[in-house]
Structure formats: structure tokens, C-alpha cells
Amino acid sequence: MATVVDIRDLTIAYGGGPPVLSGFSATLPERSFTCVVGSSGVGKSTLLRVIADLVAPAGGEVVVPDRGHDEGSRPFALVFQEPRLLPWRRVIDNVMFGLEGMKLSHRQRLTRAQEALALVGLGDHAGRWPHQLSGGQRQRVNLARALAVRPRLLLLDEPFSALDAVTRHTLQGELLRLARETGTSLLFVTHDLDEAVFLADRVIVLGGRPARVTRDFRVSLAHPRQREDAGFIDHVRDLRDALSELMVDGGGI
Ligand SMILES: Nc1ncnc2c1ncn2[C@@H]1O[C@H](COP(=O)(O)OP(=O)(O)OP(=O)(O)O)[C@@H](O)[C@H]1O
Ligand SMILES: [Mg+2]
């Protein structure tokens, strides 16, 4: 499998302070789904911000293999926990907003945005205002905005944590479908171990101060995964044990 991004020995610190995260390396292949878990404040959002190039690392590098000149896509798109929609723009314009700055005509941006909204099941909500949407629908628009730039790696920071369990489970299933249909690789941060085992083929556990990779799990269960299956429950337990060990060691809290 071709590599989408090669993260090499990242060290991250804020404002010249002590490192928040140190020695983080991971190679993410095409069509892969990686979850990052770890306790609050360990550095998960920070890691995504550095990969998305919003914050510069103190050391190491994020290498995106060159795939030639491609004006029509971006290497990364970042989906935050809160939808961050512009209230004064209709849904379609919120999705098109993510395409500004790319060398696309107005018509191309409109078509892209319509396709992305159809992908997330909101093709008929293009003319609505954000306040006319439910929380789950707003998060779908947020996803559509990220997908419209056709990222090679989609970075998601606890995107479903504010949603009720039923909506969250629905969107998890849809995200897996979108990943399959678009061929996008995903790096997904979550607190929810059940969510990580449902979605990912690899789960990276961060812990300690500065944070390091303390475990790197494979999840080789077939899709669609069933939460009540023994294999699923075993994986969730293994992950929980890995996180509890960190708590006992006092490194992750
Ligand atoms: N802009 C900033 N300036 C200085 N320190 C920061 C900044 N943003 C985050 N931090 C610190 O970096 C550490 C990691 O924060 P981060 O937001 O990455 O954690 P997290 O793992 O995403 O936590 P959570 O699960 O609560 O979202 C924390 O100690 C936090 O206080
Ligand atoms: Mg965070």
C-alpha cells in the first residue's frame, strides 16, 4: 500500500515550554483507518494540529509523498469536535467555503459541494441555514466540507462526542462507508474505546508526559463489526487495560 503520510519523530512544544509530545512516528498507508486514544490533555488535538500544518513542530517532520501536481485536492482536512459552521451562510455555501483558495471555478466548487452533501446524505438540505439543522446534521455538513477538498488524509478530532448514542452510531457507520467510497485515509481522535474498536484497523495509545506512543494495536475484526461479539469486547477490554495501566503509572493523567 502506498504511503499517504509519514510522520517522523515529532516533538511538539508550545511557546518554548516543555514538550507536550515527543518521539511520535507513524506511517499511514492509503485506505487506512487509525484511531488515536489517550486521556484528556495528553496531546491528541495538538498532534492533529501539527499534522494539518496549523502548528509547527519543535522537531521531526510530516512527510507527504509527492503525487505530482494536483490543484484539485489537498493533503489534509481537519474536522473539529464542534461543527464551526458560519451561521450567515447557507449549507451549500458553508461547504463551498472550504474550497476557497483552491484553483477551481465557481461551477466546479458548486458541483463539488453538491457531491459532498449527497455523500453525507444531505443533498436536499443545501439551501438551509445552519440553525435549521440538528446537531447530527451540522456534523454531517462539517464532514462534507472536509470531504469536498478531497483530502488524502482526513483528520478528525472527536467529531461525534457531542452527539447522542444513536446518532453517533449512525455517523460511525456512515463514516466507514464514506472512507470506503472515497478511498480516503483517516486519523481519528476519540475518548471512546468502543468507537475506536468499531472504526479503526489500528489504534495508537498516547500516554505519559511528554506523551509518547505507549501501545499500537491492530484491530483485524471484519466489517460490519458487532459490538456484542466476543472479539469486539476483548479488543475494548485490551484497550481499557492499556489506558488503566497508564493511569496506575501516573503518566497519563
Ligand atoms: N495553544 C496552546 N498553548 C499552550 N498550551 C497548550 C495549547 N493548546 C494545548 N495546550 C496544552 O497542551 C497539552 C495537550 O493539549 P491537547 O488539547 O492536545 O490535549 P487533548 O489530548 O486533545 O485533550 P482532550 O482530550 O481534553 O481534548 C495540554 O496540557 C494543554 O494544556
Ligand atoms: Mg482534544
Image (cartoon, rainbow, N blue to C red):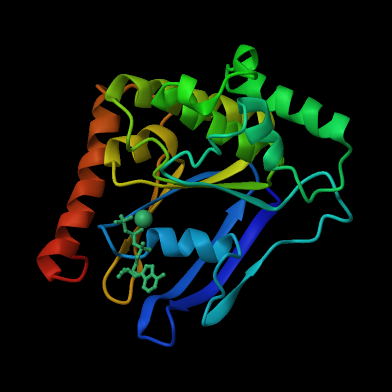
Could you say which is closer to the camera, residue 44 or residue 233?
A: 44
Q: Please indicate whether residue 78 sits to the left or right of residue 18 in the image.
A: right
Residue 41 lies, with reference to residue 187, above or below; the image says below
Task: Residue lying at the far bottom in this picture: please name it.
Answer: 16
Q: Position of residue 2 (x, y in %)?
A: 71, 51
| Near-viewer residue (78 or 109) | 109
Q: Is residue 223 visible?
A: no
Give the quadrant of ligand 2.
Answer: bottom left
Residue drawn at the location 44% of the way across and 83% of the way down? 15
- Furthest toward the front, the residue is 88
Residue 213 in the image: above or below residue 127 = below
Percent of width and height locating residue 4: 67, 53
Q: Residue 46 placed where, x, y %? A: 43, 64
The foreground one among 214 and 172 is 172
Q: Residue at x 80, y 26 (%)?
A: 111
Q: Quadrant of residue 72?
A: top right
Q: Where in the figure is residue 216, as x and y percent of width and height? A: 38, 57
- Horizontally, residue 15 falls left or right of residue 69, namely left
User: Image height check: is 60 above or below 137?
Assistant: below
Q: Quadrant of residue 129?
A: top right
Q: Please identify the quarter of the rendering in which residue 119 is found.
A: top right
Q: Residue at x 25, y 39 (%)?
A: 236
Quadrant occupied by the C terminus:
bottom left
Q: Residue furthest top?
A: 124
Residue at the (20%, 71%) spot, across then down: 251
Res 251 visible: yes
